[in-house]
Amino acid sequence: MTTPESLPEESARGIGLASVVEILRRRRLLALLPFVFVLAATASVALFLPSLWTARAKVLANQQQIPETFVKSTADTDGEARLMTLTQDILDTPRLSQVILDNDLYPSMRRTRPMADVVQRMRKDIVIEPQEDRARGGREPRWLVFSVAYTAGDPGVTARVANTLASLFTEQNQRMREQQAVGTSEFLGAQLAELRTRLAAQEQKITAYKEQHLGELPEQRDVNVRTLERLETQLQLAHENNRRALERRQLINQSLNDLDMASALTAGGVLTAAPTVAPAESAAARMSILRQELAALQTQYSDRYPDVIQMKEQIRILERRIADEEKKKAAAAASAPKNAPPVARPSRGLGLAVQNPYVLNLMQQLDQANVDAKASGEEIAGLNRQIAVYQRRLENTPKREQDLAQITRDYETTRETFRSVLAKRSEADIAAGLEQRKNSETFRVIEPARIPDRAAGPHRMRLLLVGVALALGAAGAAIILAEQIDTSYRRPEEVRAAAGVPVLSTIPRIVTETDRRQTMRLRRMTMAAVAVGLVLVVGTSFVVAHNNQSLVTLLTPETAATVKR
């Protein structure tokens, strides 16, 4: 007979694998229900999910046929950037909407959802994956290969749509490169026209400035200096000629004065029948000449000029001499006998005086000296004016040089820019012709999409394994929950362990016929409820999984469409 103290130890040793087996045997029906329902749900979902097929086309970017050392393309040469641009351009709503309508894609979705949602769904089904082959240690890409994949429920449709998308890439790439080349050429043409207009305006401005300040320009400085030196030399020569003319005129005037004095000294002697020159007439002629010279000097100099003062003094002396001669002639005429024969003498006036060859020669020399003096004076005045003009030009040359340097600097900058843009425009025109003739870098489909041999998803075996695991988990959770809720005692050991008192006896369960019929009825109702539940679960799974490509994409992550950058 065991003591009460040893009973808990035996009870503790008895709880183990046998207890677990006992619990599973007792709760087998409770564990079977969640296991069956969960497994039926996952299996039916895996069975009713549509198969997704992925078709893939591979596109190669061909190198430019003409080496870039001869013709450089103006289009974008960065393969990754160009692929991203083309992707955004091709996957826009209008183009994908046309592809959807042409291939009758997503018919059920188009009946219930707007076209924008359908296009967004198609974007998720498209995979664009670049594959760059890099040369020279992978430092720079040499060519570009990328694949265009499309996933759908129909294998034939996937291949057709994938090829359509690949052809759109090739066509859009050629169109985009042509537009870039032509756009670059047109932009440079507009810039060239603007620069040509600006250059013409600056040339006109420079021309107008040079015409306005002709003679003061920096490039004319040397000419102006040489001209000024020549004018100064001519001025010195003119001063020398003027000095000589004045000296010659002074000498001639002195000779004529001496002649007048000699005539005055011989006037008191016996008058010959044919005198050469009368003193009064010589003085009158001399005075007439001096007055002419005085009038010429007064046109150039003031009354305080020494030559003018000297000339006036000579005229005053001659006038006084002529007056004395007239008085003498009048007195002689009054004292002469009335019957005396008239003395033959020359008539008064300048004409008689100039009949003397010597006087005539002197007067001619005097006239020539006056002409030379006047001409040299006018030449001096003209040379002084010219020298002043050239000196003013030389003084203004630094300012003109500064102004012209500023204008020319802008002109040179514009001209250099014009030449650079002109060269770029020529290269852009050649590049545009290269793109239009399709001799540049182009996209070519090297592997067209074929109808796939096997589906890309879903992985039904994987889903079944997941379903079995979930069913086992649900069954275990149901058993644990039931054991935690049920507080009844199943064995005498549990009573002794819990109450600490000995169990005197155990009464087995008494099952009557009525209990058996109720148990059978309960089992049949349970089986019917389970069958109905299974039908509901399978039906719900069919509704959820049938043609549900989104769920397939969600349950198959590798089919999710992403553009790898």
Image (cartoon, helix red, strand yellow):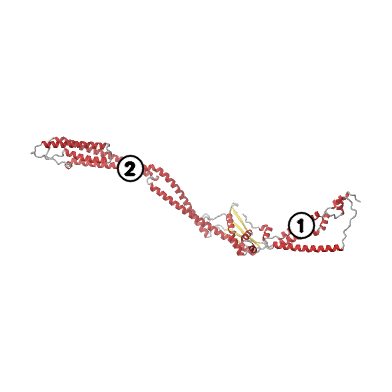
Residue 448 relative to residue 419: left or right: right
Question: In the image, 471: left or right of 323?
Answer: right
- The picture quadrant where one finds residue 537 is bottom right
The residue wearing badge 2 is 385
Image-based side of 311 in relation to 276, left or right = right
Visible residue check, residue 448: no
Question: Pointer 2: residues within 10 angstroms few (<14), some, or many (20+)?
Answer: few
Image quarter of the C terminus:
bottom right
Residue 384: percent from the left, percent from the top?
Answer: 32, 41
Q: Is residue 43 visible?
A: yes
Tell which tag, 2 or 1, sits nearer the viewer: 1
Most extreme residue toward the left, as rendered?
339
> Which of the pair 452/508 is nearer the observer?
508
At label 2, the amino acid type is Arg
Does residue 98 appear to the left or right of 253 in the view shown? right
Q: Position of residue 72 (x, y in %)?
A: 52, 55
Q: Is residue 537 shown above or below 279?
A: below
The image's mark for residue 551 is none
**Residue at (60% x, 62% y) in the render:** 99
> As shown in the figure, which amino acid type bears the numbered disc 1?
Ala
Residue 440 at x, y percent in the picture: 54, 58
Using the numbered discs, state the Cα–Cα distance from disc 2 to disc 1 in whole angstroms: 123 Å
- Sooner in the amino-acid sequence: mark 2 or mark 1: 2
Q: Mark 1 highlights which residue?
A: 474
> Dot 2 lies on which element?
helix
Residue 344: quarter of image: top left
The image position of residue 381, as x and y in percent, is 30, 42
